[in-house]
Image: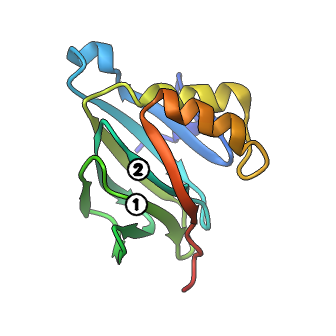
């Protein structure tokens, strides 16, 4: 597996690296695929995708996922499906970063990551700006990030 940081098109935002492998426009809007490398302890605030289903394909590391009130761990080789409209979050746990593919159907949400990286917006300091961008991408934040230990 090539080092994500050295690959053309990799974006960095808030300690996480993102590289879009399949853009929405390259699939006729059907889906997008983003390769993500997230450091230990990182993860988004609880949120809902109103227009996209989201699938995580775990390549390395371990994530604790919270999906509609249920927690589970996912590690290398696991896949997790989150239907659109479902409140969810994750946090990277353990001792190594998590590399995972994020598959979004339909596509288009990859633009959110590009917008966040371009502005180098910070959570929680820039949540008003992040929330406005999220709304443009059919996303709403519903709660705080997960804690690595609970």
Q: Nearer the viewer, residue 61 or 139?
A: 139
The crowd level at tag 2 (other Cα within 10 Å; few <14, some 14-19, many 20+) is many
What is the spatial separation of the Cα atoms under label 1 and label 2, in whole angstroms?
7 Å
* Relative to 103, residue 115 above or below: above
In which image quadrant can residue 67 be found?
Answer: bottom left
Q: Position of residue 40 (x, y in %)?
A: 60, 66
Q: What residue sits 31% from the left and 20% below the top?
A: 24
Give residue 88's mark. Answer: 1
- Residue 19 x/y as whole percent: 47, 32
User: Marks 1 and 2: CB-CB under 8 Å?
Assistant: yes
Q: Left or right of 87: which side holds 12?
A: right
Residue occupying the point 57% across, 83% down: 149
Q: Left or right of 14: which side holds 114? A: left
Secondary structure state at the residue bearing disc 2: strand
| 144 to the left or right of 83 | right
Residue under numbered circle 2: 48
Instruction: Please tell me which of labels 1 and 2 falls first in the chain.
Output: 2
Callout 1 secondary element:
strand
């Amino acid at each position: 597996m090539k080092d994500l940081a050295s690959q053309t098109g990799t974006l960095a935002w808030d300690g996480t690296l993102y590289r879009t492998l399949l853009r929405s426009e390259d699939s006729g809007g059907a889906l997008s695929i983003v390769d993500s490398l997230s450091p230990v302890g990182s993860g988004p605030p609880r949120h809902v995708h109103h227009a996209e289903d989201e699938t995580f394909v775990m390549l390395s590391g371990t994530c604790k996922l919270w999906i509609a009130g249920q927690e589970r761990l996912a590690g290398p080789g696991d896949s997790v499906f989150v239907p659109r409209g479902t409140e969810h979050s994750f946090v990277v746990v353990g001792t190594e970063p998590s590399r995972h593919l994020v598959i979004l159907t339909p596509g288009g949400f990859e633009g959110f990551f590009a917008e966040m990286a371009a502005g180098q917006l910070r959570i929680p300091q820039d949540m008003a700006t992040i929330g406005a961008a999220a709304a443009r991408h059919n996303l709403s934040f519903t709660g705080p990030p997960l804690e690595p230990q609970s």
